Image (cartoon, rainbow, N blue to C red):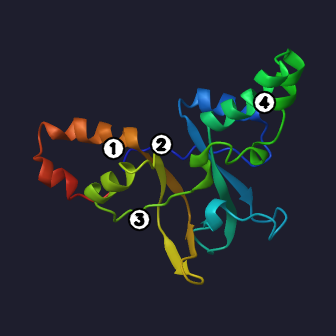
Amino acid sequence: MFGKRRLVEVPYTASLARTMNTLVANQVVAVPVPVPAAAQPGQWIGVGGSMVMESDKQTGVVRKHYIGMVTMLDILAHIAGDDQMNGGDDASDIDKKMSVPVSSIIGHYLEGLSLWTLSPNTSIVDCMEVLSKGIHRALVPLDSQMQNISGVELVESAPGYRMLTQMDMLEFLKENASHLDLQGIISRRV
């Protein structure tokens, strides 16, 4: 994950218009949506029951909780909605739809209902396996603390994250395939 830029995200209160501008400006198709730790404690549960949080590196105090991922497909599904059946395509409908908070549309598209994380120690081959099963992106903590709460519920807390995508994996393989043997590449860690 060396050389990856800072994680692009939008706050849960951002409008869809602002979210779409962020996606376009940063040339990404999805962004995680965090809620500040102080905002209505206990109201937000991450998608799929996930508890992915960003914490202060020095104190360990939680700063924000990621509640999901919003993709361009979520926005398009929201804009399209049931307009075709109602014939509603005028500008005021679009303006109204683009002004809703991003937190209200997480999960319109199935992929937004899961928030995946990968350990920075995950091998390239294991990352390839995960990303080959329909998972398009995963958060990778910079420095992680994981704890099991009950059963399969997991709490992940880190001072920051980077996003690993299927495209990142392909670019890495393309860039390194000519001067390294494939076995050496896939045994490396993220």
Q: Nearer the viewer, residue 67 or 121?
A: 67
- Identified by mark 1, the residue type is Met
Report which residue position mark 4 lands on.
82
Distance between the alpha carbons at the discs numbered 3 and 4: 40 Å
Q: Nearer the viewer, residue 152 or 53?
A: 152
Question: Which label sits in the foreground, 2 or 3?
Answer: 3
Q: Residue at x 60, y 27 (%)?
A: 25
Callout 4: helix, strand or loop?
loop
Residue 190 lies, in percent from the top left, at 33, 56
Report which residue position mark 2 lands on.
5
- Residues marked 1 and 4 touching at CB (< 8 Å): no
Distance between the alpha carbons at the discs numbered 1 and 4: 36 Å
User: In the image, 181: left or right of 154?
Assistant: left
Task: Identify the residue at the far bottom of this view.
Answer: 150
> Going from the N terminus, do you reach mark 1 or mark 4 first?
4
Question: Which label sits in the foreground, 1 or 4?
Answer: 4
The 10 Å Cα crowd at callout 2, few under 14, some 14 to 19, many 20 or more, is few
Callout 3: helix, strand or loop?
loop
The 10 Å Cα crowd at callout 4, few under 14, some 14 to 19, many 20 or more, is few
